[in-house]
Amino acid sequence: MTHARRRTGRIAEDLAARRLRARGWRIVERNARTRLGELDIVALDRGCLVFVEVKAGRRGSYYGPERPVLAVGPRKQSRLRRLAAAWMTVNRGRARFAEIRFDVIGVSFDGRRCVGYEHIRDAF
């Protein structure tokens, strides 16, 4: 992954985390590492533990899906489920929750400017 793509992804994750906090969510961990890989955001939305995948894209790009959220297909969903299970195994007492869910946030950029933000709750 190029430095520019990593930077764009980091900016998108920062924006998503700020917006989630503004809505009253508690961010439990960002860029949570497990033995299987990394989760972008682990958060609490009231009594629900939410694993949030953040996708960034460039408006008018020739590559990738039309909207960044569409980049989370069945293979990525399966991987995220495995990552979440690994995270919960290691972090059993870290957060109290009654249920879990998976959300996807897509952020579109035109240069450095955010031109689109899409949050899909309970995406899969």
Image (cartoon, helix red, strand yellow):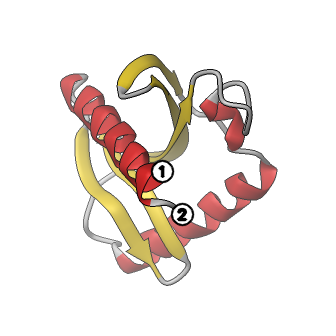
| Residue placed most toward the observer, 17 or 124 | 17
Contact, mark 2 vs mark 1 (Cβ under 8 Å): yes
Q: Where is residue 50 shown, x and y percent of the image?
A: 43, 45
Is residue 48 among what the camera can see? no
Residue 1 - label? 2
User: Would you say 107 lies left or right of 114 here?
Assistant: right
Crowd around label 1: few <14 · some 14–19 · many ≥20 (10 Å): few
Which residue in the rendered view is the most extreme toward the bottom? 35
User: Would you say 80 lies left or right of 52 here?
Assistant: right
Give the alpha-carbon distance from disc 2 to disc 1, as whole Å.
Answer: 6 Å
Residue 34 in the image: above or below residue 111: below
Which residue in the rendered view is the most extreme toward the right? 74
| Residue placed most toward the observer, 122 or 9 | 9
Residue depicted at 70% across the width and 55% down the height: 76
Residue 32 in the image: above or below residue 56: below
| Residue placed most toward the observer, 93 or 26 | 26
Residue depicted at 45% across the width and 77% down the height: 34
Q: Where is residue 79 shown, x and y percent of the image?
A: 67, 64
Q: Which residue is mark 1?
A: 5
Q: Where is residue 88 shown, x and y percent of the image?
A: 44, 69
